[in-house]
Image: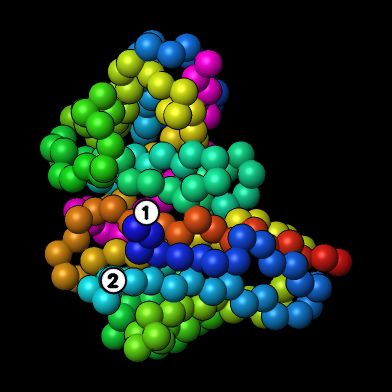
């Protein structure tokens, strides 16, 4: 069974640009979560989607947004990139609402210059 | 304010010995705790979990202990193997009390198991 997949693996952008990251959950999983792991920090919760709806968001500015599609895949959009947005962005999925055994993808490494 | 703390950034143990990774939390409303392992260039992998109604959960070489009064949990790996070398994250959630979906993670402890 395929795990959580993310694309792209690496991305380099400049300040002020916009970026879209993509995630495909494990088949049968309806919840998708996004986390940011900046250098030296733990994983910081960004967004939780379930059944196409945003269920919760972390303490991040509105320029971080996303959506979940009918096939449960998800996109994370970051507008007006700042240097401190450089981080590993991890997507996770789980079976249902708040099912806490979350399965993670390999992440997208975003570098903002 | 960090709700989940892993105060040791790194730990080095000899192969075959016990590895003990520690985690402290501040919110007594957490009711579910998890450990994840992360290798470089990979996403975190779920290892083991424990609910707040238990004080111990075992899975093969991995045992998690929970001390609610001290708001402390630990992960024991016995015996440690070189392949266990990775970063270990402790995470907590409000699973039974009304999940908000997100896990709250510590900053991780880098375990090195030397042959």
Expressed as whole percent of the image width and height from the top left, the position of residue B11 reads 69, 67
User: Residue A32 at what x, y percent from top left?
Assistant: 29, 42
Is residue A110 magenta-colored?
Answer: yes
Task: Give the spatial CA distance, label 2 vs label 1.
Answer: 21 Å
- For residue A27, say whether it is visible: no
Q: Residue at x 78, y 78 (%)?
A: B16
Residue A78 appears in the picture as rendered? yes
Instruction: Identify the residue position indicated by label 2 in the image.
Output: B27
Query: Looking at the rendering, in which quadrant would you find the N terminus of chain B?
Result: bottom left
Residue A4 lies in the magenta stretch: no
Q: Nearer the viewer, residue B32 or A111?
A: A111
- A107 lies left or right of A56: right
Horizontal and vertical percent for residue A96? 22, 53
In magenta, the rendered stretch is A96-113
The local secondary structure at tag 1 comes to loop
* Nearer mark to the viewer, of 2 and 1: 2
The residue sitting at 54% across, 74% down in the picture is B22
Question: Which element type, helix, strand or loop, lies under badge 2?
Answer: loop
Quadrant holding the C terminus of chain B: bottom right
**Protein chain holding label 1:** A
**Residues marked 2 and 1 touching at CB (< 8 Å):** no
Question: The residue marked by circle 2 belongs to what chain?
Answer: B
Query: Residue A6, image x and y in percent?
Result: 44, 31
Q: Which residue is mark 1?
A: A102
Circle 1 crowding by C-alpha within 10 Å: few under 14, some 14–19, many from 20: many
């Amino acid at each position: 069974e395929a795990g959580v997949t993310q694309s792209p693996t690496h991305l380099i952008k400049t300040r002020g640009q916009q970026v879209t990251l993509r995630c495909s959950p494990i088949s049968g999983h309806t919840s998708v979560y996004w986390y940011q792991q900046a250098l030296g920090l733990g994983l910081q919760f960004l967004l939780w989607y379930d059944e196409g709806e945003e269920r919760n968001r972390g303490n991040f500015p509105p320029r971080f947004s996303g959506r979940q599609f009918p096939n449960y895949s998800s996109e994370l959009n970051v507008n007006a990139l700042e240097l401190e947005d450089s981080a590993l962005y991890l997507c996770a999925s789980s079976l249902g609402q708040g099912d806490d055994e979350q399965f993670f993808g390999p992440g997208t490494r975003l570098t903002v210059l | 304010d960090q709700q989940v703390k892993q105060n040791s950034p790194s730990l080095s143990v000899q192969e075959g010995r016990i590895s003990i990774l520690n985690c402290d939390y501040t919110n007594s409303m957490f009711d579910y705790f998890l450990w994840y392992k992360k290798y470089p260039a990979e996403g975190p992998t779920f290892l083991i979990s424990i609910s707040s109604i238990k004080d111990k959960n075992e899975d093969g070489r991995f045992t998690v202990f929970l001390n609610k009064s001290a708001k402390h949990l630990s992960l024991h790996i016995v015996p440690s193997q070189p392949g266990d070398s990775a970063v270990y994250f402790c995470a907590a959630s409000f699973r039974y009390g009304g999940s908000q979906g997100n896990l709250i993670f510590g900053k991780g402890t880098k375990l090195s198991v030397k042959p």
